[in-house]
Image (cartoon, coloured by chain):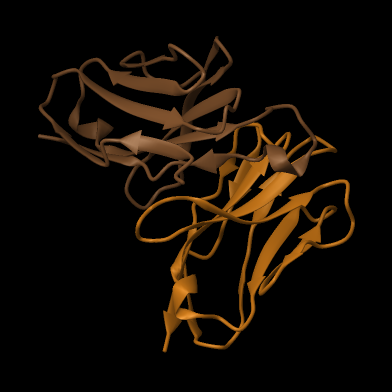
Chain colours: A brown, B orange
C-alpha cells in the first residue's frame, strides 16, 4: 500500500550522462515536491509542481529540470550530473499547499540514492 | 527567509529513558506549522508530530510530545520511554501551511542504547 513510490531506489550514473529519477503517487495529491538531501545534511527543496504549475527555488541549478505529465507522476531530470550532485533525492506530495487542515501534510517516498562515477 | 536550527547533532538515550531534542526557528509569520520528522536508516521520512502555531496546547502523539514556545520560537521534541526503534535521524521542519514546502533543520541523530 505504498503511497509515494520512487524508482529506482539506487541509481548509478556516469559524470555528465543525463539521468532521470521518477516518482509516482496513489494519493491523487495536487502537489509534488523534489528535495535533495546530501550526506548528513537536511533535505533542501529543489522545486515543486502545484497541479501543472512549476515552481522553481531560486537557488536550484539549471542542471536540474522536472516534468509532470499527469497527476500521478513526476520526474527529476539531471542534464549533466556532476560529482556534487550525488545525493538522496526525495519526492513528497501534499494535497493542498495552502490548506490549514492537518491532513494536508506532506508524504514522502523512500528516496533514490544517486551515485555519480 | 525562514530558518530552522537544531543545535544537537547527536543525542544518546538509554532504552526506556526520556530524551529531548531542541529546535529553534526564525520567521516573521504569525501563522505557521511546525513538524518533527523521523528518518530511519531505510531513509523514508515519516511524520512524528505536528503543531499549528495558533494553538497554544502542545501536541502529543503517544510517547512523543512537544514543548512549543511561540515567543521564544522554540519547538522541542520529547521522546518518552525510548525504544530501540526510535533510533533515527530526527528533523525539525517549518512550513507556512500544513501542506506547503518544508524548511528543515540540520537534524539530530538519536542513538538508543539497550
- Whether residue A88 is visible to the viewer of this picture, yes or no, is yes
- B49 over B32 or under it: above or below: below
- x, y percent for residue B66: 73, 65
- x, y percent for residue B102: 59, 38
**Which of these two is toward me, B95 or A66?**
A66
Q: Residue lying furthest front in this view? A: A1
Residue at horizontal 49 percent and vertical 72 percent from the top = B86
Counting every numbered tag in the picture gives 0
Residue at horizontal 55 percent and vertical 49 percent from the top = B105
Locate the C terminus of chain A by quadrant: top left
Residue at horizontal 48 percent and vertical 50 percent from the top = B45
Name the quadrant containing residue B99.
Answer: top right
Name the quadrant containing residue B109.
Answer: bottom left
- A42 over A56 or under it: above or below: below
**Which of these two is toward me, A18 or A7?**
A7
With A29 as the anchor, is A24 left or right in this view?
Answer: left
- x, y percent for residue A77: 30, 18
- x, y percent for residue A71: 52, 18
Residue at horizontal 88 percent and vertical 46 percent from the top = B54
- Whether residue B66 is visible to the viewer of this picture, yes or no, is no
- A109 over B83 or under it: above or below: above
Amino acid at each position: 500500500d505504498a503511497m509515494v513510490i520512487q524508482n529506482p531506489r539506487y541509481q548509478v550514473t556516469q559524470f555528465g550522462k543525463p539521468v532521470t529519477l521518477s516518482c509516482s503517487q496513489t494519493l491523487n495529491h495536487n502537489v509534488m515536491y523534489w528535495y535533495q538531501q546530501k550526506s548528513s545534511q537536511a533535505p533542501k527543496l529543489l522545486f515543486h509542481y502545484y497541479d501543472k504549475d512549476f515552481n522553481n527555488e531560486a537557488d536550484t541549478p539549471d542542471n536540474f529540470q522536472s516534468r509532470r505529465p499527469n497527476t500521478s507522476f513526476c520526474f527529476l531530470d539531471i542534464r549533466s550530473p556532476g560529482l556534487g550532485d550525488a545525493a538522496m533525492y526525495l519526492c513528497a506530495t501534499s494535497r493542498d499547499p495552502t490548506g490549514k487542515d492537518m491532513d494536508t501534510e506532506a508524504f514522502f517516498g523512500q528516496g533514490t540514492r544517486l551515485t555519480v562515477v | 527567509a525562514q530558518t530552522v536550527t537544531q543545535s544537537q547533532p547527536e543525542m544518546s538515550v538509554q532504552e526506556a529513558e526520556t530524551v529531548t531534542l531542541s529546535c529553534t526557528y526564525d520567521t516573521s509569520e504569525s501563522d505557521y506549522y511546525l513538524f518533527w520528522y523521523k528518518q530511519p536508516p531505510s531513509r523514508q521520512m515519516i511524520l512524528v508530530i505536528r503543531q499549528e502555531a495558533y494553538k497554544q496546547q502542545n501536541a502529543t502523539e503517544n510517547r512523543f510530545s512537544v514543548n512549543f514556545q511561540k515567543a521564544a520560537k522554540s519547538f522541542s521534541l520529547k521522546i518518552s520511554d525510548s525504544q530501540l526503534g526510535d533510533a533515527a535521524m530526527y528533523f525539525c521542519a517549518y512550513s507556512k501551511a500544513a501542506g506547503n514546502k518544508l524548511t528543515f533543520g540540520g537534524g539530530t541523530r538519536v542513538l538508543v542504547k539497550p
